[in-house]
């Protein structure tokens, strides 16, 4: 039986913008009885001084191959989470996610668990996933990236082609959609959204509109995306942005819990 000290929530921030997100995500996890370690992968652009730990030096040829494929840069960085071998199991969360309640039960799942992508449900969305750090897997992933690239030029395409039996092999590896509910999708199955949306545990601001791009009007209680009018497409965002921005502004909320109200 593995101890909890050997498990971690992991996120990634390669620049100042995503650092804001990582901070809010970290705070949102702490608000809900954090029982695991909290890890952020940071690239040198953010801090003046960084102590880099390079766990893989045998893979130099892979790094060279990546230099010719700069578009895969951030993808390569996300794959670094497999090098966290001092943990037995981790949950990766994109820096643009927000945790609404305790999600420790995710550690009961095995590699590779993720929720379906709202745009193509036979693929998983790579914003939230359970994985097991392993230098061997990391090497295979890098090799796969060099040999096959990524069909969406990002980590999600690469991970979906690497873990390609995800959609058929083991239903336990399908995380419920409430662990990765996209905030800016117009849900076409609205009765399901009404029925289950309020149980969301992790909201993901995937796509181009990030939570730090929204403007929220506390008086009217409505959300304005930069340069656009409020729309029903932003129903989830409308609900969670006050929370997001209060965490961002370091204002403590009275109640620790938060549920989505979708009426
Ligand atoms: N990321 C980063 N810097 C970047 C782009 C992405 O650190 O310039 C990290 C960050 O953790 C982010 C994740 O990679 O949440 C995936 O990117 P993003 O969330 O923008 O993709 P989407 O979820 O919109 O597909
Ligand atoms: Mn994301």
Image (tube, rainbow, N blue to C red):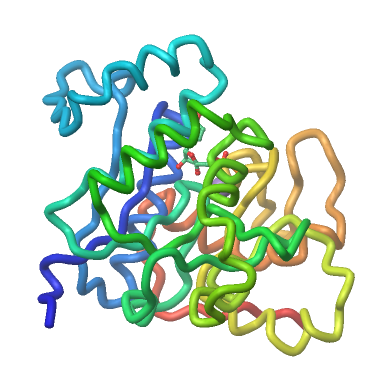
Instruction: Tell me residue 169's x, y (percent).
Output: 56, 74
Q: Is residue 100 above or below residue 227?
A: below
| Residue drawn where x is 44% and y is 11% of the image | 67
Of 137 and 208, nearer the camera is 137
Q: Looking at the picture, does residue 30 appear above or below residue 15?
A: below
Residue 237 in view in this figure: no
Residue 120 in percent (x, y) is at 76, 58
Which residue occupies the foreground of this view, 216 or 16?
Answer: 16
Residue 129 position, x and y percent, is 45, 61
Quadrant location of the C terminus in the rendered image: bottom right
- Residue drawn 57% across the image and 65% down it: 166
114 with respect to 8 (left or right): right
Q: Height in image: 42 above or below 156? A: above
In the image, residue 173 sits, relative to residue 55, either above or below, namely below
| Residue at the image position 32 percent from the left and 70 percent from the top | 31
**Quadrant placement of the N terminus:** bottom left
């Amino acid at each position: 039986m593995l101890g909890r000290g050997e498990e971690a929530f992991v996120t990634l921030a390669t620049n100042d913008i995503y650092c804001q997100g990582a901070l809010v995500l970290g705070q949102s996890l702490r608000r809900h009885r954090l029982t695991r370690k909290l890890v952020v992968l940071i690239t040198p652009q953010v801090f003046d001084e960084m102590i880099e730990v390079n766990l893989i030096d045998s893979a130099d040829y892979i790094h060279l191959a990546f230099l010719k494929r700069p578009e895969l840069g951030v993808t390569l960085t996300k794959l670094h989470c497999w090098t966290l071998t001092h943990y037995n199991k981790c949950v990766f969360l994109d820096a643009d996610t927000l945790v609404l309640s305790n999600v420790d039960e995710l550690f009961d799942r095995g590699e590779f668990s993720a929720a379906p992508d709202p745009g193509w449900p036979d693929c998983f969305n790579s914003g939230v996933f359970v994985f097991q750090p392993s230098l061997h897997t990391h090497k295979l992933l890098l090799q796969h990236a060099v040999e096959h690239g990524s069909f969406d030029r990002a980590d999600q395409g690469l991970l979906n082609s690497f873990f390609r039996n995800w959609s058929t092999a083991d239903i336990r590896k399908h995380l419920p959609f409430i662990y990765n509910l996209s905030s800016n999708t117009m849900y076409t199955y609205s009765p399901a959204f009404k029925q289950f949306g309020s149980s969301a545990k992790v909201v993901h601001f995937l796509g181009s509109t990030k939570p730090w791009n929204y403007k929220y009007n506390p008086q009217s209680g409505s959300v304005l995306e930069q340069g656009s009018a409020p729309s029903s497409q932003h129903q989830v965002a409308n609900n969670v942005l006050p929370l997001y921005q209060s965490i961002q502004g370091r204002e403590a909320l009275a109640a620790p819990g938060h549920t989505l109200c979708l009426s």
